[in-house]
Amino acid sequence: MHMLRHAPRMLLGQALGSSRVRYMSDLPVAPVADSAFVEAWKKVIPNMEPPKTPLSFMHPRPPTPSSIPSKISVNFVLPYQSELSTKQVDMVIIPATTGQMGVLPGHVATIAELKPGVLSVHEGSEVTKYFVSSGFAFIHANSFADIVAVEAVPVDQIDPSLVQKGLAEFTQKLSSASTDLEKAEAQIGVDVHGALNSSITG
């Protein structure tokens, strides 16, 4: 029992010492076992079969192509639904915290945090725009992009009058806020509604 209690800590140390961090774009074409973990497990508890690790449950990604494809495959998901599933498009423009980021086929592997703003999906002459509140974008070297947002809505479904009303209300709250918490909450409201306003006026 003593060995079992300390097994996770010992395995973690051994596994981290012998392997690097895995990224989604590093996943192999076929599912494989996490060899570093299995090897560390067998050293600590040789008489017990090792449990499955997250790597065992991950769907394999297509290999990185030898040439840059003409399209980028986009997965765009929310906590409660999928907006886009492996949709092949020409380009996607992401509202990253570092600025607007255009992603084309062959883009280098990148992780970007999203800020309130417009996510644009370009397919030929058609451009679909979503307002996203926050989230992350995972750009993979094999021309796949996984975009995860906390909340999103098509820009053409936003009600301008409600945006103006919300912006005025949070601006008033910010000017009358007396505590740091009230100021922070009001500032978030101003930032989000300001970004919403820009998405429908810009």
Image: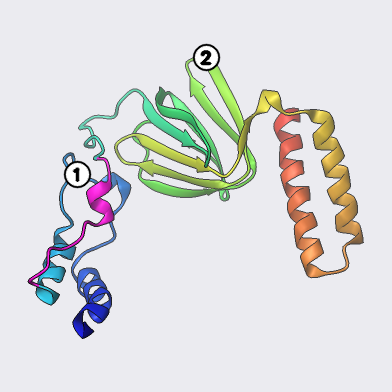
Q: Residue furthest top?
A: 125
**Above or below, comparing residue 41 to residue 60 in the picture:** below
State the scheme by which the image is colored: rainbow
Foreground of the two, 90 or 173: 173
Left or right: 131 as drawn, with respect to 62: right
Numbered badge on residue 125: 2
Q: Residues within 10 Å of mark 1 (few under 14, many from 20)?
A: some
- What residue sits right under mark 1 in the picture? 28
Mark 1 falls on what kind of element?
Answer: loop
Secondary structure of the residue carrying tag 2 is loop
The tag earlier along the polypeptide, 2 or 1, is: 1
Residue at screen point 34% across, 34% down: 143
Q: Residue sitting at 25 percent across and 75 percent down?
A: 13
Boundaries of the magenta span: 46-59
Residue 137 placement, left or right of 150: left
43 shown above or below 171: below
How far from the left and from the top, in percent, is residue 86? 38, 28
Task: Indicate the quadrant containing the C terminus: top left, top right, bottom left or bottom right.
Answer: top right
Using the image as rendered, state which of residue 115 and residue 70 is in the foreground.
Answer: 115
Q: CA distance from mark 2 to mark 1?
A: 35 Å
Quadrant location of residue 95? top right
Residue at x 60%, y 27% (from the top left corner): 129
Apparent side of residue 74 relative to residue 52 in the rendered image (left or right) = right
The amino acid marked with disc number 2 is Ser
Indicate the amino acid at tag 1.
Pro
Front-lying residue, 30 or 102: 30
Q: Is residue 43 visible?
A: yes
Give the quarter of the figure containing the N terminus.
bottom left
Look at the picture and state if 169 lies above or below 71.
Answer: below
